[in-house]
Image (cartoon, rainbow, N blue to C red):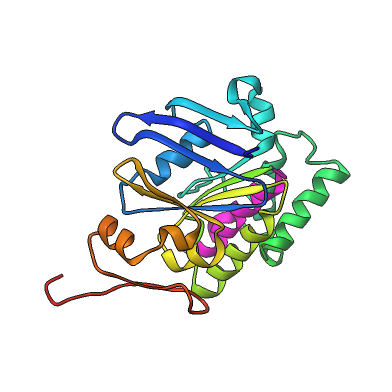
Amino acid sequence: MALMEARGLTLNKRLQSVDVALSPGEMLGVIGPNGSGKSSLLQSLAGLLPASGEVLLDGRPYAAFSALERARRIGFLPQFCESVWSLAAEDIVALGRLPWRDQETETGRAAIAEALRETETLPFAQKRVDQLSGGERARVWLARALAGCPSVILADEPIASLDLFYQARVMGTLRRFAQAPRGAVVALHDLALAARYCDQICLMREGCVAAQGKPAEVLTKAMLSEVFGVPIHVDLACSPPVILPVWTKTI
């Protein structure tokens, strides 16, 4: 049984009858050009956009869960995160325990501390979030999602503001999270990282699923070149995998 499954998700022109499934123990990478529907898909899976169709969690439709139950089961990391208040990083992470209402209990404090350690944000846990770099803030918001101990994390471009060192760290964190019975759906622009860390790939184009399957099945030269509109060099046998555009003088 799929951990999370979408059937026929449709939202204006942003999503067009999208079917996608996440199995326990998997990381599903969602890739595609700008405007292809990656963020809309993740927001619809999170129940934040009113897409038609159906989303199932452990084989049960969302309607079968209360809002509180869904908040406990699904951790959502949007592409852009901001805090209205100048809170300490640790307080931001503690917000991830709100669905459990146990921030001050031993269980809640342990979950917060573990999320800080896992994301390597413990050294600046007491610093105000507006005093942190963009990369530090990105890891704090990831820690917030982890602190809720969800069964599914939906992460929209979680490495966008990170340097190479922390890109690998964050992808490794998500990879460790996505162990059965949990799973993660991650929208990415870096195709090589998707090939390296993801078990399944969903390639989006103009709101539709152009291809879905194992990285070797989806990340082909022909498929990527067609969808992205530029020649793509693909070497999945290399360690780590290499996927790069082949630039020409006319581009």
Of residues 109 and 171, which is closer to you in this image? Answer: 171
> x and y percent of residue 129 in the render?
58, 55
Q: Residue at x 26, y 58 (%)?
A: 226
Identify which residue, 59 or 132, lies in the foreground: 59
- Quarter of the image where the C terminus is located: bottom left
Magenta segment, prevailing SS (helix, strand or loop)? helix
**For residue 117, which quarter of the picture?**
bottom right
Horizontal and vertical percent position of residue 20: 49, 40
**Farthest left residue in view:** 250
The residue closer to the viewer here, 20 or 167, is 20
- Eyeballing the image, is 174 above or below 164? above
> At x 41% / y 62%, what residue is drawn?
219
Instruction: Count numbered badges in the picture.
Output: 0
Span highlighted in magenta in the image: 129-150
Residue, x 32% and y 36% (percent of image)?
A: 14
The answer to whether residue 133 is seen in the rendering is: no
Q: Residue furthest right?
A: 106
In the rendered image, residue 16, in percent from the top left (x then y), is placed at 34, 34
Query: Based on the displayed image, in which of its 4 quarters is residue 126 positioned?
Result: bottom right
**Is 242 contained in the magenta span?**
no
Residue 213 location, x and y as percent?
48, 52
Look at the image and tell me whether residue 251 can be seen.
yes
| 35 relative to 189 in the view: left or right | left
Q: Residue at x 76, y 33 (%)?
A: 101
Judge by depth and name the residue closer to the eye, 140 or 217.
Answer: 217
